[in-house]
Amino acid sequence: HCCTSSSIMSTAYFRVVWTVLAIVLMATDSLSATEEHGGADGETESAHDEELVEAFEEPAYAVLYPSLILTFGVLVFYLLSRYLHFLPYTAIMFLLGTFMGIGAAASSKENHIHQTILAWQSINSEVLLLVFLPGLIFKDALGQNVHLFTIALGQLFIFAFPLVLAGTVLTALIGYYIFPYGWSFNLAMTFGSILSATDPVAVAALLEEVGAPPRLKTHIAGESLLNDGAAIVFFSIFSEKFFYELGIEHFGEDIDWAAGVSLFCQKALGGCAFGILFGIGILLVLYFLDRRF
């Protein structure tokens, strides 16, 4: 029980970096976009932010920023778990990240925190994804019960692939028929693929506190472990189709259903195959390291 609790807590702590950084970047980006539409004052403020980023003389602070956010998240988790049980941890971190992003975009003070947030605002989103997502998935996989995961693999496959696609389609239908933005269906499907993957950290922690059956926890955590890959594949397919609709030369690709299924199998099953090969390689390395010559 202690090991499982520590695993969940460490996973939640590590996800703090991803969650807060993402919220900070979204908040600063959205506020900057609003200011740009505000006229000359918005352009002046945007130019001022760019000058701050260019004048950032201590890049080491930007490297240390995730550690600061991680420490901040651990402190918040401690306070909530000890004194404020009724407040949801994930929602509080979401609000704090939003306030930090808005404060950094609206503030004119040139301190290290402000400059660091502006530096992280300009980071490539794919770099952020490739740096943090593999660690999150590895940590989730490391904490799984292999026996229960193997038994529930068929159900997890249904949860993570067909039902993620169903969630993508249902969300896309809402964006296509209800939202007043005039989106094309491929853009709506891209939107649906972004929202289709679930993050069960708060739910897993709650299940651990109430003493839920291990198989139920395996279903929730295992589905989350697999659905990230499915959502990324769906996003890649439909975003390429949407980019093709824009009519820009060499930008996007017209992927038909046959090519989409082939691309899905190539990325999803190919990724699983590479993961198995790397896992076997690591086991062989550990086996030889453990031998006494």
Image (tube, rainbow, N blue to C red):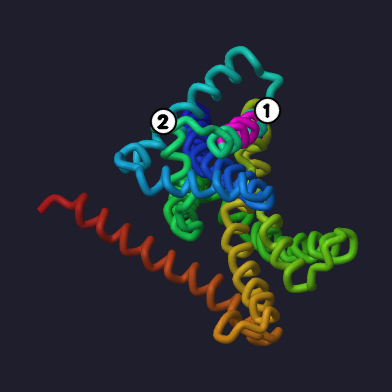
Label 2 vs 1, first from the N-terminus: 1
Q: Quadrant of the C terminus?
A: bottom left
On the question of residue 117 being in view, the answer is yes
49 or 183, nearer to the observer: 49
Q: Badge 1: few (under 14), some or many (20 or more) residues near its Cα, within 10 Å?
A: some
Query: Looking at the magenta stretch, what is its main secondary structure?
Result: helix
Magenta stretch containing residue 86, yes or no?
no
Q: Nearer the viewer, residue 88 or 62?
A: 62
Mark 1 lies on a secondary structure that is: loop
Q: Is residue 142 visible?
A: no
> Hey, which quadrant is residue 278 in on the image?
bottom left
Q: Is residue 129 above or below residue 230?
A: above
> To which quarter of the image does residue 172 belong?
bottom right
Q: Position of residue 44 (x, y in %)?
A: 55, 46
CA gap, disc 2 and disc 1: 31 Å
Residue type at tag 1: Pro
Q: Secondary structure at mark 2?
A: loop
Which stretch did the figure color magenta? 92-100
Residue under numbered circle 1: 88
Q: Eyeballing the image, is 293 above or below 200?
A: below
Rendering coords of residue 117 (x, y %): 47, 40
Mark 2 — residue?
A: 111
Name the kind of residue labelled 2 in the image.
Asn
